[in-house]
Image (cartoon, rainbow, N blue to C red):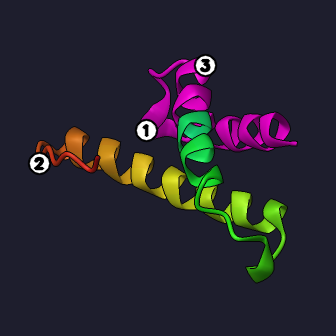
């Protein structure tokens, strides 16, 4: 389930014009790293894992898009 969710999220990100130069494997690796980090924090008493994973990946996707959009404009900010 984690791999399928990460791949679908990476495909959506790859379709953005701003990320045309990145390989899909690099995007998948970045999202998988974030998913595995947040796996330790997950508390199942607060909700389902699938919803939590989608929320984490969505927020990381937004951060990646902001990072490359700021870098493209010349104001390079490190979001890590």
Closer to the N terminus: mark 1 or mark 3? 1
Q: Is residue 30 left or right of residue 53?
A: left
Q: In the figure, 40 relative to 2: above or below? A: below
| Residue density around tag 3, few if under 14, some if 14–19, many if 20 or more, within 10 Å | few
| Residue density around tag 1, few if under 14, some if 14–19, many if 20 or more, within 10 Å | some
- Viewer-proximal residue among 36 and 51: 36
Q: Is residue 51 left or right of residue 32?
A: right
Closer to the N terminus: mark 3 or mark 2? 3
Distance CA(mark 2)–CA(mark 1): 15 Å
Q: In the figure, 33 relative to 39: above or below? A: above
In the image, what residue occupies the spot 53% across and 51% down?
Answer: 61
Instruction: Say if the magenta span includes residue 15.
Output: yes
Query: What kind of secondary structure does the magenta stretch mostly adopt?
Result: helix
Distance CA(mark 3)–CA(mark 2): 26 Å
Residue farthest toward the bottom in the current orientation of the protein: 46
On residue 75, which mark appears? 2
Q: Is residue 64 left or right of residue 33?
A: left
Instruction: Say if the magenta span includes residue 33.
Output: no
- Viewer-proximal residue among 40 and 17: 40
Closer to the N terminus: mark 2 or mark 1? 1
Q: In the figure, 45 relative to 73: above or below? A: below
In the image, what residue occupies the spot 54% across and 46% down?
Answer: 37
Corner quadrant of residue 25: top right
Distance CA(mark 1)–CA(mark 3): 16 Å
On residue 18, which mark appears? 1
Q: Secondary structure at mark 1?
A: helix
Number of marks in the rendered image: 3
Report the span colored magenta. 1-30
Q: Which residue is mark 3?
A: 25
In the image, what residue occupies the spot 29% across and 46% down?
Answer: 80
């Amino acid at each position: 389930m984690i791999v399928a969710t990460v791949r679908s999220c990476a495909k959506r990100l790859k379709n953005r014009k701003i990320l045309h130069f990145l390989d899909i494997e690099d995007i998948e690796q970045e999202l998988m790293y974030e998913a595995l980090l947040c796996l330790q924090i997950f508390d199942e008493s607060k909700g389902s894992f699938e919803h939590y994973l989608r929320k984490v990946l969505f927020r990381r996707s937004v951060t990646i898009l902001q990072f490359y959009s700021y870098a493209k404009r010349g104001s390079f900010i490190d979001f890590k």
